Amino acid sequence: MDGKELNMVKKVYIIGHRNPDTDAIVAATAYAELKHMLGKKEYMAVRAGHLSPQTEYIFKRFNIEPPKYIPDLRPKTEYYMRDSFCTIDEGTSLWTAMDKLVESGEPVISIVDEEGHYKGILNYNAFALNSVKILNPKRNDIFTASLHLIERTLNATPVVEFDPDEKFNCSIMVGDDDVETFRLLLEEHKSENIIVITGDRQDIQKLCIEFGVRAMIITKDYILPKELHELAKEKKVSVLVGHDSTMTTAMLIEYSAPVIDMADKTIQPVHAYDTVQKIRPLLAQSPNRCLPVVDDDNKVIGIISETDLLQEPNIQVILVDHNEPHQAVEGIEHYVIQEIIDHHRINTFTTRYPITLINKPVGSTSTIISNMFRENRLPIPKHIAALLLCGILSDTLILQSATTTEYDVLTAEYLSTIVDIDIQALGNDIIRSGSHIGNRKAVEVIRQDMKDYNEGKLKYTVSQIEVDSTSEILKRKQEFLDELESARKSAGNLFNALLVTDITQLSSIMFLASDPSFEQVVNLPKQDEHVYYMQNIVSRKKQLIPLLTDLLSQVEQ
Ligand SMILES: [Mn+2]
């Protein structure tokens, strides 16, 4: 497989703007449902911010799970790692493990315990280094193994066997001396777990069994005589019979050590949630520029190398209800954007690939999504129709805002027949659910529906809230102005504004915290110090933003 295939797109996030309003959240939810109905399961609605009180009310009312919250899309390990990888159980013999390492073609294999927890890595460096230490003939051939591991490495058959899984330190000896000389040698190593490799020398075989060595390995398929077989059972001496010659057996047996003894246990794995920025230097320092990836439980779930970071990430995105980069979730520039579905002015990204860009001058993104169901000849499920209707009514102030088109009205009527709820009644419920300022902090109200804008080098924000009456917020005027001013200063903006729309009057007031260079060109009727009256203005994007853009052109840059 090449890298492209390995990093196949696993998930496509459908996501609205930061500080999402109802339209952004329901459009994402409904569009993901449409994709699922078309058999595309990899699409998933997510949200780039907290639910506003209105959106929360709607999801609760229709008993629907809101999209998952994603605080940012900064590149993370899980978006680049490969999840096709092999691991080796820590008890596997070094011989089998090396075989697997060579076969995998990877520079590194993770060693895990029975439950898949990370224990260390096997790579060629660790093998070479530990070979010098462990397979060193000066160390008297002492290494750890078990009879089972030896059997598997040598392909040997046990004829008499005791405690095959017990791990012990072995001293290997080759029984090729004269019997008396060999007896002295055995005496010398009496305290150790001796494993003797021997051929068809029955005198040596008998000596070893009587002496009570830990195990005896008979080479070249020689047969153990019946009486020695009985004696071995009696003396509890294990006997294995292998196919190879003494020389090959002596060499292979040392590869029976469990692989964990040859592992590099100093290498720390990376976490799936680690940012690419964090793991880049770790990869650069790692012996093979390649590291295992673990989950919260320290279980190995993938592998990542420096080359993987050069591939496209395995997630892509669809943007709904916005197209300006600074309104999108942080980190968006790292991903392929498949589609943009929106109803705002175009001030958008350049893309690397052709994309589906649907932008219609209608009252809500929900209107566009509703009609995509119809274009695909798919029935709109009742709960999705309810969400989409709320999206339209919320964005158009119950079909009254200047952005409302005939298309929105017809779509809302169509949806209301599916949901079987009166448009005006539902509209009143949802507008009211979002309009209570009550005891909420000014900062919370301002951030709930705040959008960032750029005009050349000038930056500003406009927040909006819909209310039953402006008197409550006017009583707390100073608190709101102070909050706008401190947010403006910390962001280095020209101004931060809050549009307070009175849904009973279909007019607004605007709180403005501004640099004097802008406020002096604002020629709107003043209702109070830094508070302007905006007759008949209810739409931020269609009425207020063009007006502000005009005023901005008069500011000396
Ligand atoms: Mn919208």
Image (tube, rainbow, N blue to C red):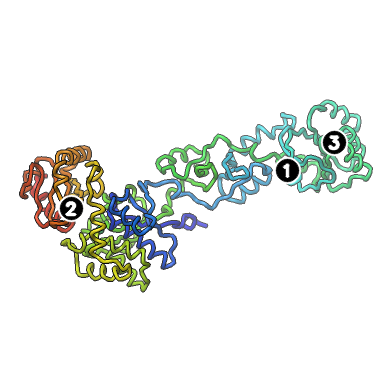
The residue drawn where x is 51% and y is 47% is 303
Left or right: 14 as drawn, with respect to 9: left
Position of residue 323 measured from the top left corner of the image (x, y, whole percent): 27, 56
Q: Residue furthest right?
A: 227
Per the model, the C-alpha gap separating discs 2 and 1 is: 78 Å
Residue 23 in the image, given as x and y percentages of width and height? 28, 58
Amino acid type, mark 2 = Asp
User: The residue tagged with tag 2: helix, strand or loop?
Assistant: loop
**Mark 2 vs 1, N-terminal side:** 1
Disc on the earlier residue, 2 or 3: 3
| Element class at badge 3 | loop
Q: Which label is found at residue 149?
A: 1
Q: In the rendered image, which quarter is residue 389 located in?
A: bottom left
> Label 3 crowding class (10 Å Cα cut-off): few <14, some 14-19, many 20+?
many
Residue 533 x %, y %: 9, 50
Q: Is residue 328 above or below residue 189?
A: below
- Determine the CA span between mark 3 and mark 1: 21 Å
